[in-house]
Amino acid sequence: MNPLWISVSVCSIIICCCSTRAAADIGVCYGLNGNNLPPPEEVVALYKQYGIKNIRLFNPDPSVLQALRGSGIAVIVGVPNEDIPTLASTQAGAQQWFEANLAPYLNDVNFSFIAVGNEVVPEGDGTAIAAAMQNMQTVLKTRNLGGRVKVSTAMPLTVLGTSYPPSAGQFTAAVDGVMRAVLAVLAAECAPLMINVYPYYGYVGDPANVELDYAIFRSNRTAVRDGGLEYSNMFDAMVDAFYSAMEKADGSAVGVAVTESGWPSAGKGNLTTVEIAGTYNRNLVARLKRNTGTPKRPNAKIDGYIFAMFNENLKPGDITEQNWGLFYPNKEPVYPVF
């Protein structure tokens, strides 16, 4: 297997080593990079119509939080990357951010996680992340929310300098210090690290050497052997590569939250068809519903978030970036999943 499969730019899966759950939670990320999306009230109704009980928001948009009032949907809400220095600078800064953005909705919005930043590293400066997380955790405790709402941050798999085979997973030297600080905060609060996992990038980066069936959960044989562990899908291998890196950074006690995973349905020819995207996401949901862990951590149950709810026509980048959605803006499914 070519190591390029793990070189990815990476809404999510939760494996928490500090708790067990009877069944996996499955959610969908809700982005707002479009000028033709339905109003938030209709979006929340669509989540409920299809029985989607968990949502990830990338920022605390007031209109979306207002629409979520009384819905019962569990919410991961993001702190924008540009707000992290404010949260990290002082406890008062974190308190002010919380009071302005989340406090008005505490009585009737079901917050489950606060994600302090999304993929800040390796491209940006992550030295403030751990302090921002700690300050936000302190805010939650002062509001008696420490046991109900967890704090984490979302990382791409590109923080791994070594990733193949999965047991060799290791953070790059540039981010190792940042990751150790983040993992220490998470371990103290028994919270998972959020990671964004995209087998799609592994496949399109090297389609001559990576089997499509391995990337979309369709293989019925072992594709990768790593010591005594066997992998039939790339998703599990990517998660375990991250686990290995975390163990090497003194994060063995921390679980993960794969907060984005998906496949675009257009933009790169026969690599991004409706059929392939639908197959990947349906098989992802089926894999999550089995309530099994990975080969490395077989007893860790996984909650997952698909990226994304809608095709978003204002997302920058190539045309694939605008075609990750489960639904068109008119609320018709691109393909059936739920």
Image: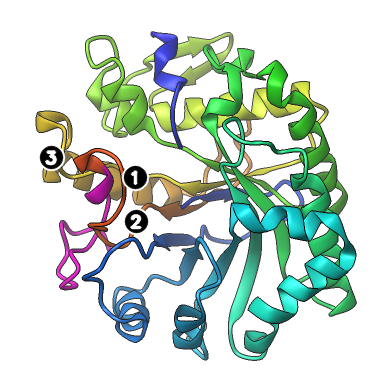
Check disc 2 and give the amino acid type.
Ala
Q: Which residue is mark 3?
A: 273
**Secondary structure state at the residue bearing disc 2:** loop
- Seen in the picture, residue 85 relative to 113 is either above or below; the reply is above
Give the image location of residue 40, x and y in percent: 36, 80
- Name which quarter of the figure residue 173 lies in: top right
Check disc 3 and give the amino acid type.
Thr
- Depth check: give the residue in front, 150 or 227: 150
Q: Which residue is mark 2?
A: 308
Tell me the distance, in whole angstroms, between the alpha carbons under discs 2 and 3: 16 Å
Q: Residue at x 40, y 35 (%)?
A: 198
Residue 262: which disc?
1
Tell me the distance, in whole angstroms, between the alpha carbons under discs 1 and 2: 7 Å
Q: Are marks 1 and 2 in contact (CB under 8 Å)?
A: yes
Query: Within the magenta stretch, is there residue 302?
Result: no
Which quarter of the figure is the C terminus placed in? bottom left
**Magenta segment range?**
321-338
- Depth check: give the residue in front, 101 or 113: 101
Check disc 1 and give the amino acid type.
Gly
Query: Within the magenta stretch, is there residue 332?
Result: yes
Magenta-drawn stretch, dominant element (helix, strand or loop): loop
- Seen in the picture, residue 232 relative to 254 is either above or below; the reply is above
